[in-house]
Amino acid sequence: MSTAEVPFTSVDLVNLTSRSEYANQKRDITGYLWFDGSMFLQYLEGPADAIDTLETKITSDPRHSIVKRFTRSLPADERRFTGWSMRLMNDNERFEMHMEGVLVALLEIPYDDEARPARSPWMLTDRLSELHAAKR
């Protein structure tokens, strides 16, 4: 997470995303970028040395200042965003992804891309109702 130190227009964000997408493809990095007008949230996945190099570049960029760094290592062969070398995510997509993560964790449903249809919001809502009823 970082705070913007200069104004970013929608054109600036598209340009930043395009340059990042091109560079990340060369480095085998995937992930997304979200911007709310003052704060950036960026998720990166890929080879550790490529992530470290990119992180050094990001940290030295004067257009923003790092607020918080989160680290979570996944096995090298696992990625969440295989098709996104860098995607500018909108608010709805970010909210849906966050809620999916919260619900999956709450319901202790194992993450499995093959089983995605079983994790639809309606199935999760039904499961929440069942758990709530069972606690009564």
Image: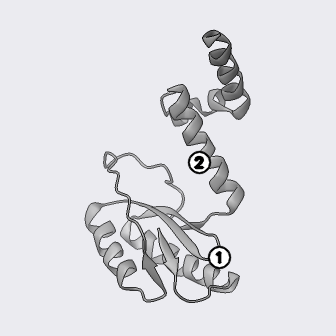
Q: Quadrant of the C terminus?
A: top right
Q: Looking at the image, which residue sits at the far left?
A: 49
Q: Do labels 1 and 2 touch, CB within 8 Å?
A: no
User: Which quadrant of the view contains residue 125?
Assistant: top right
Q: Secondary structure at mark 1?
A: loop
Q: Against 108, is 18 above or below?
A: below
The structure residue drawn at horizontal position 61% and vertical position 12%, both measured from the top left corner, is: 135
69 sits to left or right of 111? left
Q: Which residue is mark 1?
A: 37
Q: Against 67, is 80 above or below?
A: above
The structure residue drawn at horizontal position 34% and vertical position 56%, both measured from the top left corner, is: 71
Q: Against 117, is 64 above or below?
A: below
Q: Which residue is mark 2?
A: 98
Q: Secondary structure at mark 2?
A: helix
76 sits to left or right of 136? left
- 10 or 48: nearer the eye? 10
Residue 81: x and y in percent read 51, 54
Q: Amino acid at mark 2?
A: His
Q: Amino acid at mark 1?
A: Gly
- 133 or 71: nearer the eye? 133
